Amino acid sequence: MTDNVEDFVEDVVEDVVEDVTEDYFDDCSMLLADLAIAPQQALHQQFESFLHLYSIAPRSFSNMLKTPFRDSRYKGADWLNELFLGHEQRFYDALRMDKPIFMLLCQKIIETGAYSQHQRTKVSIEESLGIFLHTIGMHERHQNSAERFQRSPETISRHVHIVVEALCRMAPDYIRPPDFNKVPDFIQNNAQLIPYFKASIVSC
């Protein structure tokens, strides 16, 4: 047995990947006993290699049996595509935005450069904006959005922040305060309201 230790170890590891049984661990224990009796100088390297394989084989087999978590075939991109092909009202109810405005906003986000900074992402700009609108517009928890789009909560959080960054860059061009030195027409021309603002208008 000691002359073919390496072959035996390879056979044992192959067997454990196929079927880890109590007999396998009994064989491993018997081999360890044989190796302990054999001359250490001749089998030192084989002994260390076997101990390493003995320690990692069950763990490797366990990793092979991990069950996928986000394993739905109906991904977030599929859901968005279905919304685009469906009724206008359904699209609005799901994302709180009309289709033309959605596509225009996607283009504006790309122009800000916020999305291009994350070129490694595998999420399209449409799905990224969809994640943001579904999470923020519908007051969804990240866990619920993760299930809806079949993405990890970390991915959901990252793309919400990407769109927020893009909107912040767009804010100076689209969000402007009114001219406080001018009286709005709906107040100036309203006989019921103008008396309450006369003092403010004179002070201006």
Image (cartoon, helix red, strand yellow):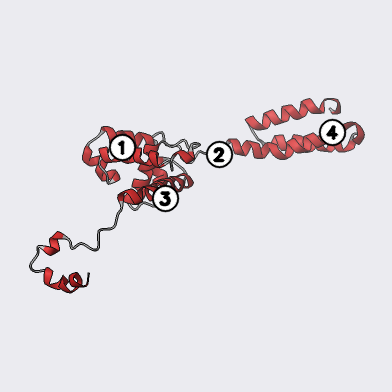
For residue 142, the mark is 3
User: Which quadrant: the N terminus?
Assistant: top right
Q: Which residue is mark 2?
A: 66
For residue 103, the mark is 1
- Mark 1 residue crowding within 10 angstroms, few (<14) / some (14–19) / many (20+): some
Q: Earlier in the sequence, mark 4 or mark 3?
A: 4
Q: Position of residue 11 (x, y in %)?
A: 72, 27
Q: Is residue 37 visible?
A: yes
- Mark 3 residue crowding within 10 angstroms, few (<14) / some (14–19) / many (20+): many
CA–CA distance in space, label 4 to label 3: 51 Å
Q: Earlier in the sequence, mark 2 or mark 4?
A: 4
Residue contact between numbered discs 2 and 3, judged by CB atoms under 8 Å: no
Residue in the image at 84% along x and 33% along y = 45
CA–CA distance in space, label 1 to label 3: 24 Å
Q: Earlier in the sequence, mark 1 or mark 4?
A: 4
Circle 4: element type? helix
Q: Earlier in the sequence, mark 1 or mark 3?
A: 1
